[in-house]
Amino acid sequence: MISALNMELEAVRMVLRNDVNEVGVYIDSKGSADKYYTVIALFSSGKAKEIARRMAVDGLFSQNSDFVGSFMQKSALHLVFAYHQESRLMNKEALYAPTFSKRREISLNFLAAVGETEIRGDIGKLLICEENINITSAGKIYLNYFLDFSKFVPSEEQDSFHREAANFAYGILTREYDAKYDGQGHMFPHELRLMYKKSQNMSFKSLSQIMAFVRSLPDKPSEQYFGIRRLVGATKSMWIFLTKNPASLFMVIVVIVTLGYLGYQLAIRATASRNLRENTVFVGMQQIGEVYLGEEHV
């Protein structure tokens, strides 16, 4: 039992525990029986001091609507957040996102949910993990705060946070193709390969940039084809282009007819020349006057 923040916090279950911190789900025995909290106890003095400094100087967590408060107990910094019933995306994605357009919608909802937490940078990277990402049957994304500070590396860099967010959104978008092509990313649709390249190059500088890119994706990205399917796909694309450009289609037809006629004439002439050579036989002269030039048979 922990008495703090005008609450009597009683542990319901532990989520994780290591040398740096522990995370548990608690209930306030003085409050509502159906309201739970996520409590993070940060044991590492160095990391606890860094978080406390940011809270005092930078207003860390102050804009987060789920943040309840913090307190010190037994040399550990405790952070208290609202807990939300777990319905993890990784377990429900196939059910709630059967199509690419639905996965695109969920990716946008994920990015919006991360933005609403007002947590960025090195702390934000701790937030973006499968254990924290939940989904409703309507496709709404909401987060918990199971933050593992053993992975916390203080940094002022923001681009790596945006890369993590883009990578997670990319994972949602490519789930179908990942299974289809056994994780061979070079076989994914062009638009998704471009997103991965931009993410790895840290080209995304904000969550809004990532969201803009995801919104621009078509309902059904064009898949790459190989072998005979690639030839068929190229032929189909060419036909679509030509039907939309009548002048180009007319010119192609004229060229095909001309080449066909030329090939026909060449074939006729080749056949006539061959027949002429076969039917024209020169037997030569066998006798001049009384002189016989042919072969004599005894």
Image (spheres, helix red, strand yellow):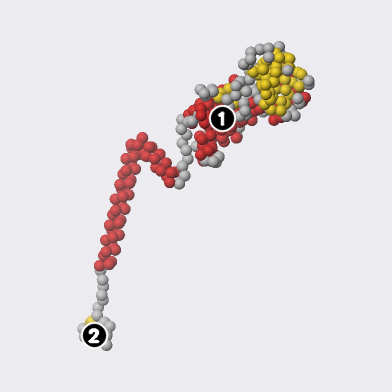
- In the image, taking residue 134 as reference, residue 216 lies left or right, namely left
Q: Residue at x 25, y 67 (%)?
A: 279
Checking the image for residue 148, the label placed there is none
Between 7 and 115, the residue placed more toward the observer is 7
| Quadrant into which the C terminus falls | bottom left
**What is the x, y in percent for residue 32?**
64, 13
- Find residue 163 and report its image quarter: top right
Q: Nearer the viewer, residue 149 or 27?
A: 27
Q: Residues within 10 Å of mark 2 (few under 14, many from 20)?
A: few
Residue 91: image tag = 1
Q: Closer to the observer: label 1 or label 2? A: 1
Residue drawn at x 68%, y 12% is: 30
Counting from the top left corner in percent of width and height, residue 232 is at 41, 43
Q: Closest to the observer: 12 or 7?
A: 12
Q: Amino acid at mark 2?
A: Val
Residue 176 falls left or right of residue 237: right
Camera sees residue 210: no
**Residue 161 x/y as whole percent:** 63, 28
Q: Secondary structure at mark 1?
A: helix
Percent x, y for residue 278?
Answer: 27, 67
Secondary structure state at the residue bearing disc 2: strand
User: Residue 291: which numbered mark, if any?
Assistant: 2
